[in-house]
Amino acid sequence: MSQFRVVRGLLIGLAIVFALAICASLGVRAAGAMRLSSATARFEKEVGPLSLLSFVKPRVPEERNAVTFLRPGVSAVILMTKDRSVVGTLATKPCAEWTPKDLLDVAPLLERNEPAFTILRRAQGISESNWEIPYEKGNDAKLPDLLGAMNAGKLVAARGRAALVRGDRETALASTEILGTMASSYQQEASLIVLLIGSALERLQLGLVRELVTAPQVDAAELDRLERSLGRADLDKAFRDTLRGEVAAMIQAIYGGQFDQEAPRVVPRALVVGLGELLVADMLDDRRTLEPSLFGPIKEPLREELRDAGWWKKLVAAYGANTGSARARGIGTLSARELAKLSIGLRRKAIETGAYPASIPTSTDPVSGEPFVFEIASPGVRVRSTTSAEILKSIYPVGSPLNAQLYSWTLPAASRSTTPPPSPAARKAASS
C-alpha cells in the first residue's frame, strides 16, 4: 500500500510539473507574440518594411545580365589549396615590393586560368545584374558561390599587379575593369554576406586603381577608363536595407519551424517559438534604436559592446546581424572610393594643365565625417582620410595591407600630357 501511495504521489507530481511547464510555455508564447507584434509595428513605421518579397529583384534578360558571364567565369577559376595563400598575398602586395620569385610563383596560375579571365572579361560594360537569389525563402535561399567569387577576385587582382610589375598596363587596366564589374554585381544584391563580398571585391579593385593612378606614366585615357570602372552603389544605404532583410528572414525562420529545429525534441514548441519571438523583438528594438546613429560618422573604434553585457543580450547578438560592424564596412569602402575619385580628378587636372590645383573642393570622408586632407608632398601632392588606423583596424579586424594603401594617396609630380585630352563627347562615346 505504501508503495502505491509513493507511485501515485510521483505521478501526481509529474502531472503537476508537466501542467506547469505547458502553462509556462503557453505564457512565453503569448508574451513573445505580443512583444514581436509590437516591435514589428514600431520597426516598420520608423525604419522600413519587413516583407521578404520586397527584396525579390525583377528578372534581367540573359543578354543584359552580367551574371551570364560572371557565374561561369568564377566557376572556371582553378586554384589548388596551396595556390590560395600565394594569390591572397599577391592580390594586395604593393607592386614596388614584388620580387622576381613572386612573378615566378603567380605565372603558372595565371596561365592555367586564362580561360576564366576571357569569360569574366565578357561581363565588362554590363551594368545590370541579378543572381536570382530566392529571397522569399529567407534563410533557406541558395546563394552564389561566394568563396569562389573571392578566390576569383584575388586572382584577378594578383594578375593586375603582376602585369604592372611587368609594365603591361593594358592587362592591369582590364583587370581593374573586371573587378569593378564583379564588385558592382554582388553589391546589387540584398543579402548581407553577398554585399560584404561585393565590398571586399571593390577594395581589391581600389588597391589596383591606386597603383595605376599614382604611376607617373598614367594618361588621360587610362584615367577615364579607371573612373568608369569605379562602383556607383550607395553602400551605406545598401547595408542598412540588407540588415533589414536579415531580420525579416529571422522572423520567417521562427514561424517556418526552422528556429525550433535547433532545440531538443522534449522542449515544447510553444516555448521555443515564444523565446524566438522575444529574441527577434529585442533585435528589432536594438536595430530601430540604432537607426539614427547609422547615418553618422564613426568617431571611435568599434568596441566590444557585449563584453560586459548579460546573457540575454549576448544571446540576442548571437542570432542577429552585427549592424554597426556591417554598416562600417560599407562606408569604409565608400571612403576609399571617394579618395580614388578625388585622386583621379587631381591627376587629370595635372595632365591637362601641367600643375595640381592649389586646393580641392570640400569633399567629406564618409567614415570620419571630416573633409579629406589635401597637402603638398613634394614633388607631388597627397590626399588622405582623417580616419585613424585604430578605427580602420576595428572596422577590418582581420587586418589587410589595403588599410595602409586605400586611405592615403601620394600622387607624383605633375606633367602636362602631349596628347590632347578627349572631348566630353569622346568620353561619352567611349563609356557607351
Image (cartoon, rainbow, N blue to C red):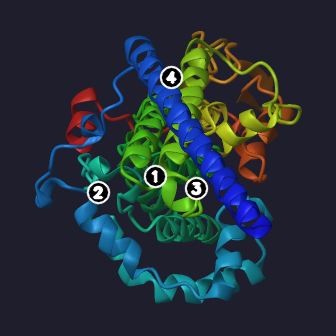
Q: Residue 194 bears which disc, if any?
A: 1
Disc with the residue nearer the chain's start (3 vs 2): 2
From the viewer's perspective, is 334 left or right of 413? left
Q: Disc 3 versus disc 2: distance between alpha carbons?
A: 39 Å
Dot 2: few (<14), some (14–19), or many (≥20) neighbours within 10 Å? many
Inspect the image, locate mark 4, and give the three-letter code of the amino acid beneath it: Arg
Marks 3, 4: nearer the viewer = 3
Q: Disc 3 versus disc 4: distance between alpha carbons?
A: 21 Å
Disc with the residue nearer the chain's start (1 vs 3): 1
x and y percentages locating residue 60 in the rendered image: 15, 51
Residue at mark 2: 131
Inspect the image, locate mark 3, and give the three-letter code of the amino acid beneath it: Val
**For residue 237, above or below residue 121:** above
Disc with the residue nearer the chain's start (1 vs 4): 4
Q: Which residue is drawn at 79% across and 65% down?
A: 2
Residue at mark 4: 35
x and y percentages locating residue 409 in the rendered image: 70, 36
Inspect the image, locate mark 2, and give the three-letter code of the amino acid beneath it: Trp
**For residue 375, above or below residue 142:** above
Inspect the image, locate mark 1, and give the three-letter code of the amino acid beneath it: Val
Disc with the residue nearer the chain's start (2 vs 1): 2
Residue at mark 3: 267
Image quadrant in which the C terminus is located: top left
From the viewer's perspective, is 356 left or right of 376? left
Q: Which residue is drawn at 35% across and 73% down?
A: 73
Disc with the residue nearer the chain's start (3 vs 4): 4
